[in-house]
Image: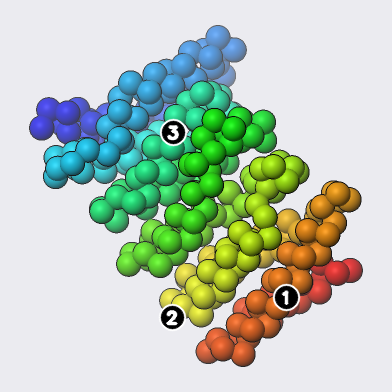
Amino acid sequence: SLRISLMALLQTILSDESFSQTLSPQQCELSSASSTFFAQFTTDVLLSLVLPNLVWKAGGMASALRKLAAATLFSLLSHYHNKKDTALLLHPETITHLIPILHSNLEDTESTTRELSCVCLTMVLEQVSTETFKSIMETNTRVIDTLYPRLLELLDDSHNPVRIAACQALEVFLTLAHSTGSSSYNLGLSSLENITSSLLIQLDDPDREIQEHAFQVLVVLLELQRNSNDIDNHDKKHGVVEMMNRKINDSLTSHRDGSLCRLLLDKVKSCHE
């Protein structure tokens, strides 16, 4: 009970905009030393207070604490999302700790915890450099190998906010995996086929918002192939585009509304140009 109260207090403080304005490098003209202090402060909060409470434990009290810890992490990250100095927040070592724990919370029984974990995972992945991602692949191969299948499972979650968060995380993950430019880390054709098939199913969902988010991920996947200039992966690029073309055409005949499929086919044509 005390730990829940303390975590709730921390979450409230971090959610307060005045806290961000007081410590944020974007809001104040801080010196290099101050920025370093702020980055270290963030790391200390994450490692000593938030992360231990995100680790799964049995019981209703532990479940409530995980939900609060996920909300606290979201509050901390959201102030600096998509801002220039975001890289100051998380050290690579902190990221390597965060990804496996957030991955495990994607299976939480609480839908809010699943959603927050997915959103936080997206924010963290957006901060990961190619080199850091390769390092994580080498030290946590199982986590990365099972991450995209878990995100695909969340596309069928019973709560739409979780499904939308999974689409956003998948989009960032695909971009990051592609950026490695190495077959050792990049996703293979069979993996991309599974992803494409799952997303095309969501493209026929009754909820328009789910359709649009699934469509956006498919667009990103096509754009990654179109913008790929790696001569060594030319055959793979051709194979991925042809696979997507076939899958989209199959879906066009079965979907209730084929408008999004037709838009995707237009983008497939641009990949051949």
- Quadrant of the frame with the N terminus: top left
Query: Residue shown at 70%/78% (left/top)?
Result: 246
Whether pointer 2 and pointer 1 mark residues with C-beta atoms closer than 8 Å, the reply is no
> Where residue 54 sits: x, y (%)?
31, 36
Image quadrant in which the C terminus is located? bottom right
Amino acid carrying label 2: it is Pro
Q: Nearer the viewer, mark 3 or mark 2?
A: 3
- Farthest left residue? 1
Q: Earlier in the sequence, mark 3 or mark 2?
A: 3
Say what secondary structure mark 1 lies in. Answer: helix
Q: Residue furthest top?
A: 33
Which residue in the structure is indicated by mark 1? Answer: 245
Q: Residue at x 30, y 35 (%)?
A: 55
Between label 2 and label 1, give the one nearer the viewer.
1
Q: Earlier in the sequence, mark 2 or mark 1?
A: 2
Q: How dense is the environment of label 3, judged by Cα within 10 Å: few (below 14), some, or many (20 and up)? A: many
Q: Which mark is residue 98?
A: 3
Residue depicted at x 30% and y 28%: 52
Crowd rating for badge 2 (residues with CA inside 10 Å; few <14, some 14–19, many 20+) = few
Q: Residue at x 53, y 89 (%)?
A: 256
Q: Is residue 1 left or right of residue 122?
A: left
- The residue lying toward the viewer, choosing from 9 and 267, is 267
* Colouring scheme applied when the structure was drawn: rainbow
Mark closest to the chain's N terminus, 3 or 1: 3
Residue 165 lies in quadrant: bottom left
| CA gap, disc 2 and disc 1 | 23 Å
Q: Is residue 8 visible?
A: yes
Query: Tag 3: residue type?
Result: Leu
Residue 111 x/y as whole percent: 29, 56
Residue 259 in the image: above or below residue 269? below
Percent of width and height locating residue 192: 63, 61
